[in-house]
Image (cartoon, rainbow, N blue to C red):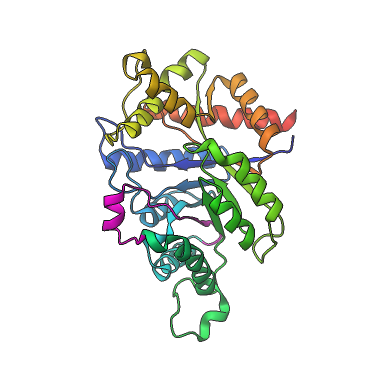
Amino acid sequence: MKNFEISVLDLAPVKQGKSIHDTFQDSLSLANHTENLNYKRFWLAEHHNMESIASSATSVLIGFIANGTKTIRVGSGGIMLPNHSSLIIAEQFGTLESLFPGRIDLGLGRAPGTDGLTAQALGRNPAIINQQFPRQILELQTYFSKENSDALVRAIPGEGLDIPLYMLGSSTESAWLAAELGLPYAFAGHFAPEQMEMAFKIYREHFQPSKQLDQPYIMACVNGVAAETSEEAHKISTTLFQAFINIVRNDRKPFAPPVDDMDDIWSPMEKSMVLQKLRYTFIGDQAEIEEKMKDFQEKFNVDELIINSHIYDHQKRLRSYEIFREAANSLSKA
């Protein structure tokens, strides 16, 4: 089993009884905490029209987190590129990289990050997404290149800066594109596990080296809930389960505190649907987390594990990331 990096995905979760200001302060606290624990990167994800997620202005929030930290890489996991013009994103991330040199990542996805009606409000045209998305990535690479200095349209800031791009995916489509363009590939196993194994296979087999990357680099996002005891971990994981029940029911309310028994909340059909979506969720004490990480790595052989943790109590969320760090360290010494 090869060693792997660990990183953070933060959706800026809004909790019942808390303000969005509280949410942002908790995100900064988490970023500082995981920086001290030597996590590799801290990513924020673009979502819209959801009471439970406050990371809609992703570039702005990245700046806030980067300004409050010192060494951890900060970036998008991801920017939903068809929601924006390529030039605007090049300028925004050029600005971020100029402010925080060598610390900014630009992860890119094609999904809307929201519902259909909001996607229309964002100006997306679903009929051309599959053609638009690859073209926009090439546009970004052009705007960031030194060679674009003679062009009539330039990204300033942005031009000539070394801002690494990452391809995000929740199906096999982006695996093909990431392989073709020679970009690192991150899969959303925390909510769409069904095609992850096939996507990694496609990416590895069809990868073409690029200026950015000479061999495949695979990142997998999973859900993680760790605590001192297995019983406590399973109790606090009910916040995550309730969040996914809300998705099933199209109810976007803020994240709820833990409950004693999920069977009081979900039906057998809903339970089956949620557990299928949460197939790659690591819940337990440190020994259990180590075992689950080991099994996952032996199966997928990833370069980096990105951990998304929906825990209502902020201090318990911080502790969860400590336990994941301890588990990863233990595995690296085995």
Task: Please identify the quadrant where the N terminus is shown.
Answer: top right
Indicate the position of residue 90 as horizontal and vertical percent values. 45, 68
Residue at the spot x=71%, y=59% of the render?
A: 214
Q: Residue furthest front?
A: 127
Tell me: 265 left or right of 152.
left
Residue at the spot x=38%, y=49% of the render?
A: 113
Give the camera-side residue of 222 and 26: 222
| In the image, residue 97 above or below residue 259 | below
Regarding residue 249, the answer to whether it shows in the image is yes
Give the camera-side residue of 109 and 103: 109
What's the magenta region? Answer: 101-125
Would you say residue 56 sits in the magenta stretch? Answer: no
Indicate the position of residue 156 as horizontal and vertical percent values. 44, 75
Tell me: 214 left or right of 78.
right
Task: Please identify the quadrant where the C terminus is shown.
Answer: top right
| In the image, residue 154 above or below residue 293 | below
Give the camera-side residue of 154 and 203: 203
Residue at the spot x=63%, y=29% of the render?
A: 293
Residue at the spot x=40%, y=56% of the render?
A: 63
| In the image, residue 88 above or below residue 146 | above
Tell me: 201 left or right of 283.
right
Would you say residue 119 sits in the magenta stretch? Answer: yes
Indicate the position of residue 20 as horizontal and vertical percent values. 27, 41
Indicate the position of residue 332 as horizontal and vertical percent values. 71, 33
Regarding residue 98, the answer to whether it shows in the image is no
